[in-house]
Image (cartoon, rainbow, N blue to C red):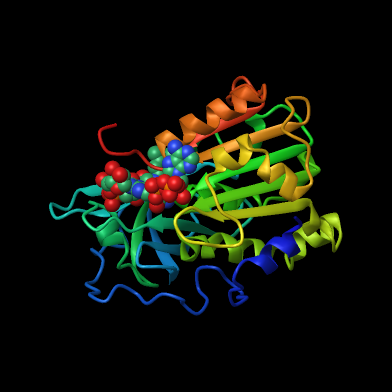
């Protein structure tokens, strides 16, 4: 299935000039108290430039980028807001924008009682957040041995680092083909990824570098697990049954050619890791590049 095919299968969403600033498909939180104020003099303060609510559980936003911030697509930083006592509540966030972007984009969960996101979900353009400009992470191209096909395997907000990587020209310089598998419980939770992929077809930088049909090199495989849709099932099941290979017309994963990046819950990461190891792929790291790398999309309860 090509990008065109998969996007046509999924419910279309309005094309927009900017994923975080376009017309919102979901309203801002009904009760919308202001986010806690960050003084402009606060160290590491950055200004919010756009906010978009995708569902009542998911939103994305963009902020100004510190001129000194250099990062590799796929890395994460710490962002936060002041708590009631004035001390910052900081959490890890994958940067969802590519390394060349003038601004930074983030894609976030809204945890109703979450110390940070119960507040962060109320930010508006012009507000400030705190951003520690020290990017780190394992989901980077450098942590993989050269290969031909890169699999990006994500659930929920785990798509955030891949939103950065699919927009990075280096991803296509290093891989002939990229497969983005994104799984959520319901179709509305796939909307951010669907629009990201749809807009890639018109990406002027990638088209200039790799030709107008470069988008054929990105295969998009969105699935739901708790709502009927054109494509369904857990990533682990679609890999082990071979369904995704048959649907996309690809051979099964091979450690000679295939590379993978995993980003989801702890249970998802561990189950996908076992599946990839079954195909003969080995986990790598920045210091020891191999065939796949893993990062948590969040830290679950009790961990
Ligand atoms: P917390 O007290 O941090 O979390 C409360 C509970 O909510 C957790 O125990 C967990 O069960 C659940 N939860 C937290 N985050 C998520 C999530 N993303 N999806 C589903 N359930 C969740 N979060 C993002 O929304 N976007 C990102 O790009 C992102 N990148 C991360 C990168 C790394 C390396 C790590 C470790 C975490 C990342 N997170 C991301 C999670 C983020 O750090 C926070 O946990 C999240 O913003 C919630 O913060 P909180 O203070 O409101 O609640
Ligand atoms: P399922 O609906 O079958 O549990 P969650 O919202 O619980 O984080 O899950 C997000 C998506 O990830 C859901 O589609 C869920 O499927 C899927 N998922 C959760 N845990 C795993 C796992 N261990 N392996 C594969 N997929 C998983």
Picture residue at 25% right of the left edge, 61% below the top: 119
Residue 47 x %, y %? 40, 64
As displayed, is residue 139 above or below residue 93?
A: above
Q: Tell me which corner region of the image, top left, top right, bottom left or bottom right, holds residue 241.
A: top right
Residue 300 lies, with reference to residue 291, above or below; the image says below
How many tags in the picture? 0
- Tell me, yes or no, if residue 132 can be seen here: no
Q: List x then y, in percent, for residue 116.
A: 27, 53
What residue is drawn where x is 81% and y is 61%? 207
Where does the image place residue 124, in percent across and percent down from the top left?
36, 72
78 or 115, which is in the foreground? 115
* Residue 257, image quadrant: top right
Which of these two is toward me, 59 or 183? 183
Answer with left or right where residue 78 lies relative to residue 33: right
Q: Is residue 17 left or right of residue 251?
A: left
Report the residue at 62% width, 43% height from top: 152
In the picture provided, is 226 more to the left or to the right than 40? right
């Amino acid at each position: 299935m090509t990008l065109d095919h998969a996007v046509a299968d999924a419910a279309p969403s309005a094309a927009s000039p900017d994923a975080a600033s376009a017309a919102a498909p979901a309203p801002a939180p009904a009760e919308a108290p202001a986010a806690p104020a960050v003084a402009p003099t606060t160290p590491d303060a950055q200004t919010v430039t756009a906010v978009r609510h995708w569902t009542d559980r998911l939103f994305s936003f963009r902020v100004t980028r510190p001129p000194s911030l250099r990062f590799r697509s796929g890395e994460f930083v710490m962002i936060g807001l002041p708590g009631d006592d004035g001390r910052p509540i900081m959490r890890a966030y994958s940067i969802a924008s590519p390394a060349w972007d003038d601004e930074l984009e983030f894609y976030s969960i809204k945890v109703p009682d979450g110390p940070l996101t119960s507040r962060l979900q109320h930010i508006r353009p012009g507000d400030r957040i705190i951003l520690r400009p020290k990017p780190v992470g394992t989901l980077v191209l450098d942590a993989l041995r050269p290969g031909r096909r890169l699999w990006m395997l994500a659930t929920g907000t785990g798509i955030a680092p891949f939103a950065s990587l699919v927009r990075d020209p280096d991803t296509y310089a290093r891989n002939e083909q990229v497969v983005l598998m994104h799984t959520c419980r319901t179709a509305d939770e796939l909307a951010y990824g669907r629009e990201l992929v749809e807009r890639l077809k018109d990406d002027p930088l990638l088209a200039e570098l790799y030709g107008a049909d470069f988008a054929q090199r990105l295969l998009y495989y969105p699935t739901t697990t708790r709502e009927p849709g054109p494509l369904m099932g857990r990533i682990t099941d679609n890999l082990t049954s071979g369904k995704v290979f048959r649907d996309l017309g690809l051979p099964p994963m091979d450690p000679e050619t295939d590379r993978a990046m995993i980003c989801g819950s702890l249970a998802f990461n561990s189950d996908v890791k076992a599946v990839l190891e079954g195909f003969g792929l080995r986990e790598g790291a920045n210091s020891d590049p191999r065939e796949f790398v893993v990062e948590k999309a969040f830290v679950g309860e009790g961990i």
